[in-house]
Amino acid sequence: MDARLTTKIVSGKDGIRQAAGILRAGGICAIPTETVYGLAANCYDEKACANVFSAKGRPQDNPLIIHIADPEMLEDICMAVPEKARLLMKAFWPGPLSLVLPKSKRIPDTVSAGLSTVAVRMPDNEIARSVIREAQVPLAAPSANRSGRPSPTTAQHVLDDMGGRIPLILDGGACTVGVESTVVDMTKDTPVILRPGDISEEELRDVAGEVAVFQRGRLPEGAAPSPGMKYVHYSPKALVKVFSGSPAAIAKTIRSLYHTHKENGGRPVILCPAEEEARYAGLSSRTMGSGKRDAERAVFTELRRADTEGFDLVLFHYADTMGEAVRDRISRAAGCRVLKDIVITR
Ligand code: TXA
Ligand code: MG
């Protein structure tokens, strides 16, 4: 890929037209979705999809999610849509839910990384759906970060990672959800959550009945049903340490590590729930807001901000109210292999 490419940031109706033009012509560009920014290509264009992998530096065995604007687009993508998948689509589309279904022959192996299945979702973002409609094809789009980095939730984040590597970023403002979609395998009788996201296990269960969770919070060893889950992920340059358990005990540990790190010439920052901020008065800290939606919106932004503000250690005070998706992302950012209840460190 030409590393001297000039990356344009565009917006509005004209921006949508420019993005769709690039995609129709076999190019790639970044588009907003409600979860995170995606790096899009025509999902039927093998070469364009290969360029997505190289621009991201993404391993070839990690398949892409296909984005559609209308349920009818599914027909060319999947062989069959089971009844439970239809129920979930009706309840959660458009929205942050990706369903893994048997793929049709039209989908190149590059997109599915050689699997016989494909992940599909309909984003709840008007701009994303307009681009898909104007491009007149479904779009394969992984998160628009360099592989291994925190996912991008603003056009600036995309520029920081992909500047000079892609021709265009369509700016749709800050993502409203902030973490990637829940990925659910629909190829067996019981749906299996492969990646936690904003749509929770309970919400899925209310609609589809029994739901299983793949390796609850553990990074799989060997072959993984969702290949993306085996990689250490979402890492800023700063070292990340995550703590969960009793707030008073966590705060004591975090404060002590903070001071030691500072005395040794380091630059620590604390990320914590709004409810616990008082425990860190006088120290460099930032709030993750209150509850799940706030924490999801903040997590990648705050990890990236730690880097741009020159911090080299992130001490993350986790609370159960932040939810499974944040727990998953922040633990992976910390490079942990197994989640523990007391201290999660690298
Ligand atoms: O919210 C999202 O899902 C965002 C936005 C851009 O839509 N996209 C995203 O894509 O997060 P990406 O590539 O960063 O993550 C895709 C995840 C990976 O964990 C991948 O392994 C899994 O989905 N996946 C894709 N196709 C799959 C398949 N056929 N079977 C199992 N897992 C699959
Ligand atoms: Mg990603």
Image: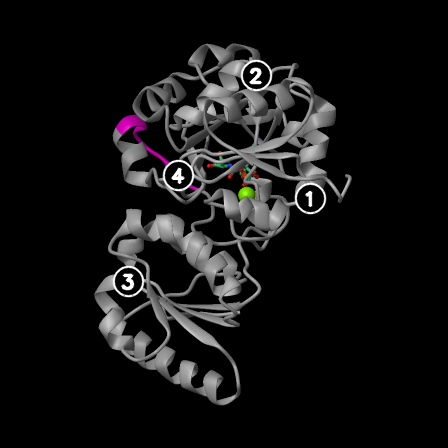
Q: Is residue 213 above or below residue 133?
A: below
Label 1 near ligand 2 (CB < 8 Å) = no
Which quadrant holds the N terminus?
top right
- Report which quarter residue 84 is drawn in: top left
Tell me the distance, in whole angstroms, between the alpha carbons under discs 3 and 1: 36 Å
Q: Residue at x 37, y 77 (%)?
A: 254
Q: Amino acid at mark 3?
A: Pro
N-term mark: 3 or 1: 1
Badge 4 density bin: few <14, some 14–19, many ≥20, Cα 10 Å = some
| Residue highlighted by disc 2 | 135
The amino acid at mark 4 is: Ala
Specify the amino acid type for callout 1.
Gly
Mark 3 or mark 2, which is nearer to you?
2
Tell me residue 126's x, y (percent): 39, 24
Residue labelled with disc 1: 164
Mark earlier in primary sequence (2, 1) = 2
Question: Which residue lies at the image location 55% right of the left edge and 50% below the top edge?
Answer: 220
Q: Which residues are magenta?
A: 207-213
Please determine whether, in this image, residue 153 is positioned above or below residue 79: below
Residue 273: mark: 3
Q: Secondary structure at mark 2?
A: helix
Mark 1, Cα crowd under 10 Å, few <14 / some 14-19 / many 20+, is some
- Of callouts 4 and 1, which one flags the residue occurring earlier in the amino acid sequence? 1
Please check the rendered image and state whether residue 118 is part of the magenta-colored stretch, yes or no: no
Query: First in sequence: mark 3 or mark 2?
Result: 2
Contact (Cβ within 8 Å) of mark 3 with mark 2 = no
- The reply to whether discs 3 and 4 touch (Cβ–Cβ < 8 Å) is no
Q: Whole-percent x and y of residue 260?
A: 45, 87
